[in-house]
Amino acid sequence: MIAMDNSLLLQLIIGILIGLSAGYVGSFMVLRKMSLVGDALSHVALPGIAIALLMNINPFFGAFTALLLAILIIWFLEKKTELPSETLVGIMFTLSLALGLLLTPEPELLEALSGDITKVTFFDLWLTLALSMVIIWTLKRIADNLMLGIISKELAMSLKIPIHKINFIFLFLAAFIVALGIKVAGTMLTGSLVIIPAAAAKNISVNLSQYSKWALIFGALSAAAGLLSASYFDISPGPTIILSAGMIFLGTLVFKK
Amino acid sequence: MSEVILKVKDLSVGFERDKVITGLDFSVNKGDVVAIVGPNGAGKSVLFRALLGLIPHFGQIEWARDLKISYVPQKFSIDKELPLSVEEFLKFKKKKTADIVDTLESLGIMTAKHAHHSEFHLQEHILKQRLGWLSGGQLQRVLIAWALLDNPDVLLFDEPTAGIDLGGEETIYNLLKKLHQERNMTILLISHDLNIVYKYATNVLCLNKEMICYGTPSTVLDPSSLAKLYGGEAGFYKHDRHG
């Protein structure tokens, strides 16, 4: 049983599930020009992880609580102002990083920063399976309205689409996937796990269904390639996953539409 | 006597001190083509948003019951890189491809049924294209198609021809005229172009934060009300078409 906990297969299943949902959620973050928000969000998770570690609970829940707080602030700002919320996101990001660095116990710090999927358990598997299914299913349901809101807020509102509610659900999903992704890629790199596969998919897609499909595929592919190469070379998987995604991105530039 | 479908009474939008629109009174009959004219910042688009219930307002806006209202907002710019095809965009509004093809056909965009071989490819091409790759005129037609897909009774159109060349502009207005005649559709449009207003509108609403005039183009678009509306500089013939 203990040998199974650490098996590469378990890592691969979890990694691919997270890659799939990260790619899909990321596809809309890229369209909403939230790439850097995704990056900042993953840093916001750090103090949450620290507090969870100090309280001896699963870091996922700490990360998720911190992220939930962050998306509430972002959502409120988006709703109240037309301004891009990047200044406040920038401030929030560095402040959380500072707080997180102070609070996180030294031995766990590197793990929180760069992730460690080699320590996953069966509980993580069930959590990941359930959450990825919820994320992908929910996003599929709101995808059309979300897209319409991206094209024109007024057009969406004139069709009586509850645009603020849709945006809130989307940010909620973003918080979920970032909290999950931290296990794999750590707080430093999770932003890229969400953004790079989607950016690669955008390069080669003419329509929305192609785009979603490629974002899912590239997310899963990055996770699988990164985990396998990390295991082969016996190095940390977080960075190799992101590097795999980066190579896919470079590859798609050749076929850019 | 035509059926009244919109009654606006003492409509104001904005804050106590900073009103964008004050004290508007007018009504629209079924089948009217109402052009809303006025300088930049006169509150024309704000009026549309209020009529659609998108922003808070004071006073009364009464639409007839069970009306289907379609709206095309101004400054509709699409990112060239946006991965969304014309077909997917139109399907956000109506799922059936047959309806989409019918509507495009009624707008004079070639479809497979009637077109020759070469034009068949053209139509395929339009539906499968990225929305952001369309020219200004094509995009505007697709937007009109979008607005017409669920057979609305009323069409609200903010600057139908902004950013379109002169030839394309004429086509779009002829299209609106055709829709008006064939379907007895009520159309409210915002326009900068007084020539167009003269040619196509049944009624004109001159707006500059308050209502300057309302009536048929030939009775209300006289030099004195135009001077009042545009601050004495613009004459009818001198008006900048792209202003």
Image (spheres, coloured by chain):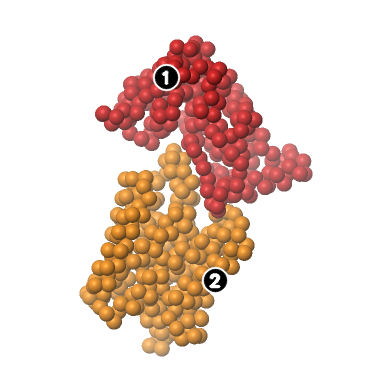
Chain colours: A orange, B red
Disc 1 is attached to a residue of which chain?
B
Q: Residue at x 31, y 31 (%)?
A: B14
Q: Quadrant of the C terminus of chain A?
A: bottom right
Where in the figure is residue B151, as x and y percent of width and height? 54, 33
Mark 2 Cα shell of 10 Å, populated few (<14), some (14-19), many (≥20) = some
Q: Where is residue B210, by image quadrant?
A: top left
**Farthest-out residue, right:** B117
The percent position of residue B3, horizontal first and vertical second, equals 47, 18
For disc 2, the chain is: A
Q: For the residues marked 1 and 2, what is the alpha-carbon distance in whole angstroms? A: 61 Å
Tell me the residue at 52%/76% (across/down). Answer: A225
Q: Is residue A252 left or right of residue A141?
A: right
Instruction: Identify residue type, mark 1.
Output: Gly
| Label 2 SS | helix
| Residue with the mark numbered 1 | B231
Q: Which mark is residue A247?
A: 2
Q: Comparing marks 1 and 2, which lies closer to the viewer? A: 1
- Residue found farthest to the left: A55
